[in-house]
């Protein structure tokens, strides 16, 4: 049997993935589901020069922050990262990581908008399955192992009920298509309707935020800020179905996204990462009765690394940058010239996990 090497640990920090960090040995060791003050033994899963990634094996001393997780799958499931501490500590760690990630930016201060519920919020959940190994559940992004989660707590009640139905007597094996032998299923509760879709390349109905109350909070703050100055024209980049701009009081809008198949002159389907996309957007705006005053951008994880160039060419007075990846957001904002940061917020759209959304408002200096 392949027995893994173990290492002693003492957690003195928590990283942006919610993992405890130990500097007790010559290698800095990252251990998921540990927290400040924990001491014990961990199994090394992988290592490189100076760094090791390990799994909690034994706790000799438990942190004062530790609580019993509500979810019975927590110790093995790769999807949640903070259920071993209470919600106020989870928010504290996220706040610290936000400050660390944006330390090179001139943020005067930032606000943290917590979630009304830590579980029971997701309107969609994706499970991975393998007909070969007869497993369905959450897939570990590191080693692709599937962890069954019949009693997951993250979804809305309707989503969780459907997950339980699929697990009951291995019902999923009857409903999954015979090929491919490995795939995924998405369970989506939308407009009082349940959709269970097998192996669709994109989310059912295109992108939408999974936590509806948090989406409303974000849109309310966007409206509060953008209401301060009248909106002549608004550009909603990576706009999907126009979620973020839809409630705003604008005269003209252009919403750009790659996948949206919405028809209407407000919408333009374009790959915003293709070489000449900025030129195409500029041309589109020129051909419209459009003075661009406000820009919203909400890119996927990869961000918009040429943001400085986009702003230089488009010259919107006001910008709202929404991001689900604070690393790429910080990268994009560090290079900006001619804009100042007005307000910064962390929205906890994904409680129990290390993910969150950030919103940063910018204003052109002249
Ligand atoms: C984080 S979502 C935001 C969507 C929208 N703002 C909302 O709140 O619903 C990112 C969006 O980027 C779009 N997208 C992904 N890759 C893209 C690309 N290469 N060009 C344009 N849009 C892209 C996706 O279709 C998705 O709608």
Image (cartoon, helix red, strand yellow):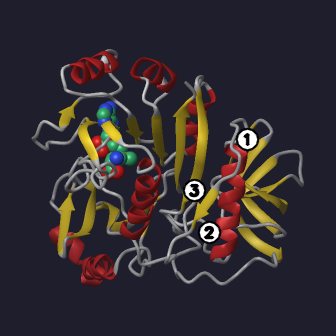
- Residue 232 visible (yes or no): yes
Indicate left or right for 264 with 247 as reference.
left
Mark 1 near ligand 1 (CB under 8 Å)? no
Q: Quadrant of residue 74?
A: bottom right
Task: Identify the residue at image location x=70%, y=38%.
Answer: 106
Residue 82 image label: 2
Task: Identify the residue at image location x=29%, y=83%.
Answer: 161
In the picture, which quadrant includes the N terminus? bottom right
| Disc 3 element | strand
Q: Nearer the viewer, mark 2 or mark 1?
A: 1
Q: Outermost residue, left direction?
A: 263
Q: Which residue is mark 1?
A: 103
Q: Which residue is mark 3?
A: 346
Task: Identify the residue at image location x=75%, y=67%.
Answer: 35
30 over 268 or under it: above or below: below
In the picture, which quadrant includes the C terminus? top right
Q: Position of residue 77 (x, y in %)?
A: 51, 68
Q: Nearer the viewer, mark 3 or mark 2?
A: 3
Q: Position of residue 8 (x, y in %)?
A: 85, 61
CA gap between label 2 and label 1 equals 23 Å
310 over 203 or under it: above or below: above
CA gap between label 3 and label 2 equals 17 Å
Which tag, 2 or 1, sits closer to the chain's start?
2
Ligand 1 placement by image quarter: top left
Which tag, 1 or 3, sits closer to the chain's start?
1
Q: Position of residue 75 (x, y in %)?
A: 59, 73
């Amino acid at each position: 049997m392949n027995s893994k090497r173990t290492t002693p640990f003492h957690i003195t920090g928590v990283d942006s993935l919610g993992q405890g960090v130990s500097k007790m040995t010559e290698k800095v060791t990252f251990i998921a589901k540990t927290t400040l003050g924990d001491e014990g033994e961990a199994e090394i899963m992988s290592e490189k020069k100076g760094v090791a990634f390990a799994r909690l094996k034994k706790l000799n001393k438990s942190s004062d922050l530790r609580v019993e997780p509500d979810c019975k799958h927590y110790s093995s499931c790769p999807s949640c990262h903070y259920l071993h501490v209470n919600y106020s500590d989870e928010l504290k760690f996220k706040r610290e990581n936000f400050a660390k990630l944006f330390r090179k930016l001139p943020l005067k201060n930032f606000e943290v908008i917590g979630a009304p519920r830590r579980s029971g919020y997701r309107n969609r959940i994706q499970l991975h399955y393998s007909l070969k190994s007869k497993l369905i559940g959450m897939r570990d992004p590191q080693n692709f192992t599937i962890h069954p989660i019949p009693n997951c707590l993250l979804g809305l009640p309707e989503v969780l009920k459907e997950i339980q139905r699929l697990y009951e007597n291995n019902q999923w094996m009857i409903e999954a298509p015979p090929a491919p032998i490995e795939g995924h299923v998405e369970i989506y509760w939308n407009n009082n309707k349940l959709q269970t879709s097998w192996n669709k390349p994109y989310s059912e109905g295109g992108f939408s935020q999974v936590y509806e109350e948090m989406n409303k909070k974000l849109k309310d703050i966007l409206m509060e800020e953008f209401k301060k100055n009248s909106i002549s024209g608004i550009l909603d980049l990576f706009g999907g179905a126009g979620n973020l701009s839809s409630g705003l009081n604008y005269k003209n809008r252009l919403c750009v996204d790659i996948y949206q198949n919405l028809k209407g002159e407000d919408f333009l389907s374009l790959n915003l990462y293709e070489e000449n996309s900025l030129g195409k957007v500029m041309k589109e705006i020129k051909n419209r009765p459009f003075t661009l005053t406000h820009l919203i951008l909400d890119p996927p994880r990869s961000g918009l690394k040429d943001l400085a160039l986009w702003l230089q060419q488009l010259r919107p007075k006001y910008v709202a940058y929404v991001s689900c990846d604070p690393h790429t957001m910080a990268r994009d904002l560090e290079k900006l010239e001619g804009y100042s940061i007005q307000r910064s917020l962390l929205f906890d759209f994904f409680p129990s996990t290390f993910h969150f959304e950030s919103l940063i408002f910018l204003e052109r200096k002249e």
